[in-house]
Image (cartoon, coloured by chain):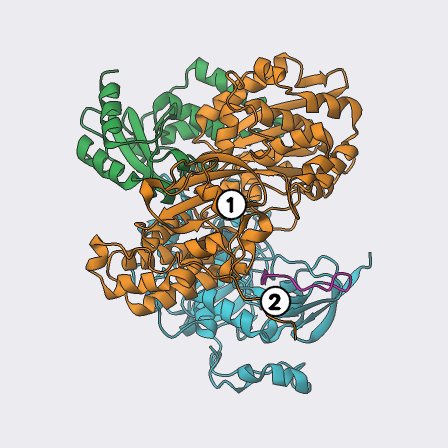
Chain colours: A cyan, B green, C orange
Amino acid sequence: MSEKVKVTIDGITLEVDNGTTILNAARQIGGDIVPPAMCYYSKLEGSGGKCRTCIVKVTKGSEKDPRPMPKLVASCRTTVMDGMEVLNITSPEVLEARAGVVEILLINHPLDCPVCDQAGECDLQNLGYEHGLQKTRYEFERRTFDRIDIGDKIQLHMNRCILCYRCVFTADQITNKRVHGILNRGDHSEISTYIQQAVDNDFSGNVIDVCPVGALTDKTFRFKNRVWFTKPVDAHRNCDHEKCNGKVTLWYKGEDVLRVTARKDQFGEVEEFICNTCRFDKKATSDWTIEHPTHIDDTSVIASNHYETLKPLHVIQPNLALQAANEIELHKTVKY
Amino acid sequence: MLKIEEQKPVVFSSELLAKFDDVITRYPEDKSKSALLPLLHLVQAEFLWVSTSAMDKVAEYLKIQPIEVYEVATFYSMYFLKPQGKYALEVCRTGPCCLVGAEKILDHLEHKLGVKEGEVTDDGLFSFRGVECLAACGFGPVLQISPEYTFYENLTVASVDKLIEDLKNK
Amino acid sequence: MSRKLLLEHINVPGINTLEVYRQKGGYRAVEKALKTLTPEEIVEEVKKSGLRGRGGAGFPTGMKWSFLAKPEGVARYLVCNADESEPGTFKDRYLMTHIPHALIEGMIVASFALGAKVSYIYVRGEMMPQIRILEKAIAEAKAAGWLGKNILGTGYDLELYVQPGGGAYICGEETALLESLEGKRGNPRIKPPFPAIAGLYGCPTVVNNVESIAAVVPIINDGGEEYAKIGIGRSTGTKLISASGNLVKPGVYEIELGLPVEEFIYSDEYCGGIANGKKLKATVAGGSSVPVLPANLTLKLANGEPRLMSYESLSEGGFATGTMLGSGGFIAFDEDQCIVRNTWNFSRFYHHESCGQCSPCREGTGWMEKVLHKIEHGHGKMEDVDLLWDIQRKIEGNTICPLGDAAAWPVASAIRHFRDEFEWHIKEPIKSQTQNYGIANYAAPIEKAPVTEEK
């Protein structure tokens, strides 16, 4: 078997390592072609497949078996085969199905962005803007849960949870003992410890960073500020925790460090998990060696004008056929 | 979220633990977590419900985290996470049984026992609830009584009345 | 009388015991298989038989077996799916209650064919009486040397265990079943890998329905070719049909595939017609997940030809005018039944049983139930019907496992064929609380399509 396989996504062909998923192949292309991922997290084994926002259409299975796949597939969990052809943003069927998933994800969501600490860096908010409807067709009472503290530094606001399971995988894989999990089933499912119990572990704070929504938030930052008023700065310190390299992002308001998070890559995933001491206890500039302002790309409203226009991919610009296929997207003045 | 002080510690008898030991032999050595569902059934048969302290003990026995037991016990519908009547009547409420009168049986039980679905009668003898399909659609309406899961088919109001009298006099 | 392969001796007193089962020729298939056939030959016979999975999906059993990976030094497992929980289906319970040894015999033959040394029968937890029956029968079989070490002196070892479920419809989905058997929540796995490559404990595994495994016994006894002679086209053999609803004689019937639906409903050999002299309004032919059909399309194809009880004939016309054989759960509705109410009831079932892992099913099933509840109880609006249609479309095909489809199809088909009944509920919010829409034209006979000349 050859090491590299060829895949075509929205008309763009590239070669990737055997075993790469469609989503990760698209991430290698980058730009708007990358399917949104609410539950998949490349650093967490077993994640993905659940939220269904990254669904794409496989129009050709592979060179060997060119039949199309009968259903839309989760790109985060479908491995690329040699010669596979995939449609993402060039397929109206995919866009419609994705809009459906977004609508469904929002029917029980409280839409309390104005009072939610995650607003401005929320994957669900971004998704809602890009693919959602302007209104809801859901007219029933939304599901509610009590807010609970899991430990003295983390608050669980279950109403906002989309059950991506990332925090459960994090507790399983990054910490040595998991005390929270998914309880009940169906739309009664909730993240919980079942009995009153603190999530107490050197690495527990990482569940805040992996949470795609405002379900798990940092109590030390709670209501301190809106993220878009804060200035992120990359910094490091000599952390003595064996598994923490002390590389973080500090979020400043004026002279004060309001919050410390792990550094995130362009897909919103943390680069390295950090320990709770770095996250919760080191909030003075003197604790840190400052590197430089954090690069903020357009996955966040922290960068301006993100929701206003679509920048055509450089691969699309010179290609007339692709321009035609993307016509609707390209001529939108507002991107949703 | 449960308040921990509501829970009383439980003691597993040596007979119960012997049953546990027997169940565990069914699986490969490092796969004893497979015994979780059968063990919870054994616990429920003994105590008529599954308390948090019992779940913690099961976790200890299987050498897994308590949350792994809570996750499972809350997923499956058969485990009672709060005390029920001595006889917990479960009536099928799914389509085929409703075609032949299951809803009438449920209404009648509420009236006859004087409690709402999920509540326990004052004498502690009965509780009832509607459950989803019990795979006896051709013999509906049907009900089962835990912990033995004895089955009663082709129910009528009269046969339900008789069943309740029989259980009271047992 | 049609041929009976599984239920031939159902009325023999004591057939649940090993002794009587043996007297009636039981365990011949084990002797034949272990002493005279190789595992490959058994798989070949099952392939020849054309047997298709009896749990609902209808995938050829022999083919499923041949996909099983056989890496050196890795255990292989056979797991029997006795989680029977599709509303309308109760054949497996019936078979296990009355002839437990038929399943055990099939398990031994199939385990031998697949090279499994340990096999499990995963029985839904609510069937505690059946679990006790099976455990007793296994003990009997083991004491008589049909299970355990060195069966019949052939050197083949097999241990067979019964595993109870905990009450979850989703565990009938094979990967959810395996998760449950591993002591976890019954969340279906994301495929690939399929169980044939990585199933129970990560080992190659085959999961088969009770009836499929029991059917292996007559296939081995009489040969796959004999079995394939029964039935029609690619629907070979006999099938257990669970008949429920408003029938004179509901119950479990073994039919030869290809029996006309009309004969199944009305003949005295089977259901004996509709109870209380009423008329048939609609049916769900293969368990609650399959599309509901009005009476006329139940009995006839869209072209007026009779519809038959077979995989192909029931699905003739696609979802526009057809349905599916599914697991063989045949539910009949008489003229007094309300399709809206039943659709709501089924919807509540799927809402209750969704595992909650993927978003379209977790949120969508609840949404559908709420809208249907509203319409059924006289608070619906006209646009709710279109909304329902749209929700089911957003669930179907977009979920990890087929539960999403199973929840969507009953709603879609009810709107497709009974839209006027939904609209009547909305237009007559008060009347619909005390009266039924009735049979309308749902039983209007379909005329045979005139033969058109080829142009």
Q: What chain is tagged by disc 1?
A: C
Looking at the picture, which amino acid does disc 1 mark?
Answer: Asn
Q: In the displayed image of the protein, which residue is found farthest to the right?
A: A1
Residue bearing mark 2: A57
Residue C155: numbered disc: none
**The C terminus of chain C sits in image quarter:** bottom right
Q: Establish if A104 lies above or below C407.
A: below
Q: Nearer the viewer, residue A73 or C115?
A: C115
Which element type, helix, strand or loop, lies under badge 1? Answer: loop
Q: Which residue is mark 1?
A: C187
In x, y percent, where is residue C306? 53, 53
Q: Which residues, given as a range, are shown in magenta?
A: A62-74
Query: Would you place residue A291 above or below residue B121 in this image?
Result: below
A144 relative to C146, above or below: below
Q: Between A305 and C368, which is closer to the camera in this rendering?
A: C368
Q: Is residue C203 magenta?
A: no
Residue A117 visible to an observer of this rendering: no
Q: CA distance from mark 2 to mark 1?
A: 24 Å
Is A237 on the left or on the right of A336, as rendered?
Answer: right
Residue A1 location (% of width, % of height): 82, 56
